[in-house]
């Protein structure tokens, strides 16, 4: 697939099933992530790969986090436990923020976000279904501790990866004039 085609036609694919990306596909995903813009060459990111029983463990961690906030409704707790089961592979994208005199934390977060986006583009180019999810549990301290995040780390998002259940939808064609203005004339 041509690079411009992947950029123009990538869409989120939420309904995913087995198989997960194979080892060669995963390597391409990670290599694409590592090409993200990175002021200062800080490489302010890392990734957790979660599959198999790890998805059940993550679901239990999600339910624990809700219970710690006082949630007791069985359906809500079960929904939290089932969230990681929506795809055969999850990649947690983590921003690792470094103290730096010229590269603020905001730039480092953006770089980690670009790394996640690179993975999504690489997934689309390989025919892998992918969706970037966050939600309140992506920013939960209990979840962050359970994932082993350090004090200088933040979850940027959960990338759900697998084989699309259905043919991916067509990307909408947007009018660039709605988003671009000429300035300074």
Image (spheres, helix red, strand yellow):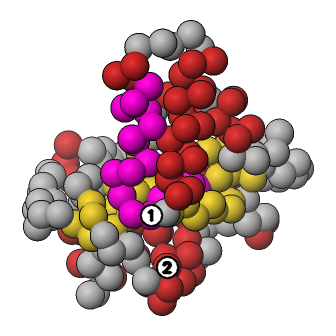
Q: Does the magenta stretch include residue 90?
A: yes
* Residue 172: quarter of image: bottom left
Q: Compared with residue 96, is residue 52 higher up or lower down, i.e. above or below?
A: below
Residue wearing tag 2 = 26
Marks 2 and 1, Cα distance to the nearest angstrom? 10 Å
Residue at 26%, 78% (x, y): give it: 127
Residue 95: x and y, percent? 68, 51
Front disc: 2 or 1: 1
* Residue 81: quarter of image: top left
Q: Can residue 116 be seen in this view?
A: no
Q: Is mark 2 on a helix, strand or loop?
A: helix
Q: Compared with residue 175, is residue 30 higher up or lower down, i.e. above or below?
A: below
Residue at 32%, 82% (x, y): give it: 126
Q: Name the side, left or right, on which 85 lies relative to 97.
A: left
Residue at 50%, 13% (x, y): give it: 71
Q: What stretch is highlighted in magenta?
A: 77-93
On residue 157, the disc is: none
Q: Does the magenta stretch include residue 42?
A: no
Residue at 83%, 51% (x, y): give it: 98
Would you say the residues marked 2 and 1 are in contact, meaning their CB atoms lie under 8 Å apart?
yes
Q: Residues within 10 Å of mark 2 (few under 14, many from 20)?
A: some
Q: Nearer the viewer, residue 116 or 166?
A: 166
């Amino acid at each position: 697939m041509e690079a411009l085609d992947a950029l123009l036609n990538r869409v989120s694919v939420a309904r995913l099933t087995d198989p997960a990306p194979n080892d060669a596909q995963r390597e391409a995903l990670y290599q694409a992530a590592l090409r993200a813009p990175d002021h200062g060459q800080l490489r302010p990111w890392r990734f957790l790969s979660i599959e198999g029983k790890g998805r059940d463990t993550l679901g239990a961690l999600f339910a624990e986090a809700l219970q710690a906030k006082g949630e007791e409704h069985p359906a809500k707790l079960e929904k939290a436990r089932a969230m990681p089961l929506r795809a055969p592979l999850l990649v947690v994208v983590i921003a690792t923020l470094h103290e730096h005199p010229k590269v603020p934390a905001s730039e480092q977060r953006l770089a980690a976000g670009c790394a996640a986006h690179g993975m999504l583009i690489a997934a689309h180019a390989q025919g892998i279904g992918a969706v970037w999810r966050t939600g309140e549990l992506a920013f939960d301290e209990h979840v962050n501790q359970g994932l082993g995040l350090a004090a200088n780390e933040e979850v940027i998002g959960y990338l759900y990866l697998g084989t699309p259940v259905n043919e991916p939808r067509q990307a909408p064609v947007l009018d660039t004039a709605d988003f671009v203005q000429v300035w300074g004339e």
